[in-house]
Amino acid sequence: MKKLVIKCFVLVILTMPSCSGGEKSLKEMAKSGDRSAQFQLANNYETGKEAPVNIEKAKYWYKQSANQGFARAQYKLGLLLHEEANFEEAFYWMQKSANQNYNLAYNAIGYFYQNGIGVESDLNKAEKFYKKAAVNGNPDAQNSLGVLYFKGLLEDKNYEKSIKWFSMAAENGNYLAQSNLAMIFKEGHGVDVDYKKALEWYQKSANQGYSEAQFELGMLYYFGNGTLVDKSKAFNYIKMAAEQGYPIAQYNLGYLYYNGEGTEKDRKISAEWIKRAHENGYEEAAVFWKENDLWQYE
C-alpha cells in the first residue's frame, strides 16, 4: 500500500467583477470584508490566476476569510499550513472547517488522526471522520477506510469491509483504490484469485499514471496472468513505471534490456537502469550488477 496523501481539489468559483465602471475590484471587495472575495483573491495568489503566485498573500487572504467562518477558506488554509509542516495550526483550521460539515475537511481530519499530524494519533477518530467523508462520496476517504480495514489497524483484518470501500472508491475513479482492488484480486484476499479483474483494475489505475499499477500491469503481461503473454506490453508498462522512479520497475527494466525481452538487447542501457534501481534502494540490483559484471558497460 502506498502512503496516503491529501488531495487538494481545484475549487470552481464564480468569477468576481474586476475594476471597470462603477464595480469594485476584487481586492477592494476583499479589503471591505467580503469573505468570498477574500477567498477568491487568496485562490488567485495561490494558483497564479490573474496575479503572480504569492503563497504568503494567499495565506493572508485565506485567513481573513477563514476568520469570518468561510469553511472552504479554513480548509485551504489548513492545506497550506500542512505543506509548511505547521501541523498544529493546520489541524486547528481543518477542524473548524469540518465543524461546518465541509466534506474535504472530514477526509483531511481523518488523515491527521490516522498519522498523528498536529494531534495525537487516534485510529478510531480517523475512521469516524473518514466515514463522514466517505458516505458523502469522497473517494479518497473511501480508499483510506479500505486501507484501515485491509491492514487490520482497528481490529482484525476485515477483507469484506476493505473490498466494499476499495470498490466504491475505485468506481469513483480513485487511482490508489483501483490499484488496491487489483491487488485484492491478484492475491486473493477475501476473494478467489482473479487475474482478469486484477488486469482490469490495474489498467484503470495505470491509465491515470500510477507507477505501481503500471509496473504490476507490466508483470501480468510478462507472465500472461489474466491475458496472453505479451513481452512488448510488459516492457512498455514497466518502462513507464521506471521512468517515474519506481525502483523495482527500474530493476526489471534493466533485466528486460539485459535479456532483450520485449525490446532489443542493450547491455549499456541495462546497466544504467540497474544502477538507478540500486541508487534508489533496491538491493537485488547490486546482486544482478555483480553477477553479470555490468561495470564493463558503464
Image (cartoon, rainbow, N blue to C red):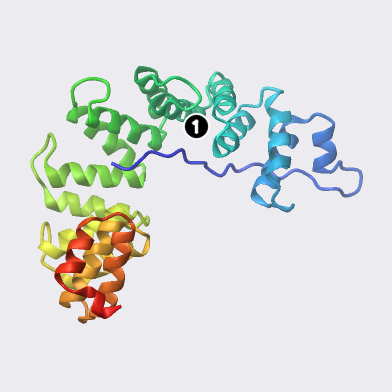
User: For this view, does 98 lie left or right of residue 242?
Assistant: right
Residue 32 image position (x, y, % from top left)? 85, 31
Residue at 68% x, 37% y is 59
Do we see residue 205 in this rendering?
yes
Residue 25 image position (x, y, % from top left)? 84, 43
Q: Between residues 257 and 17, which one lies in front from this camera angle?
A: 257
Q: Residue furthest right?
A: 22
The quadrant in which residue 277 appears is bottom left
Do we see residue 261 in this rendering?
no
- 31, above or below 279, in the image: above
- 212, above or below 30, in the image: below
- 245, above or below 231, in the image: above
**Circle 1 residue:** 104
Residue 125 image position (x, y, % from top left)? 39, 18
The quadrant in which residue 266 appears is bottom left
User: For this view, does 42 lie left or right of residue 33?
Assistant: left
Residue at 67% x, 27% y is 66
- 165, above or below 296, in the image: above
Quadrant location of the N terminus in the rendered image: top left
The quadrant in which residue 62 appears is top right
Instruction: Label 1: state its secondary structure.
Output: helix
Residue 298 image position (x, y, % from top left)? 30, 78
Residue at 59% x, 26% y is 89
Q: Residues within 10 Å of mark 1 (few under 14, many from 20)?
A: many
Say which amino acid is labelled 1.
Leu
Residue at 32% x, 64% y is 276
Q: Between residues 17 and 239, which one lies in front from this camera angle?
A: 239
Q: Residue furthest left?
A: 192
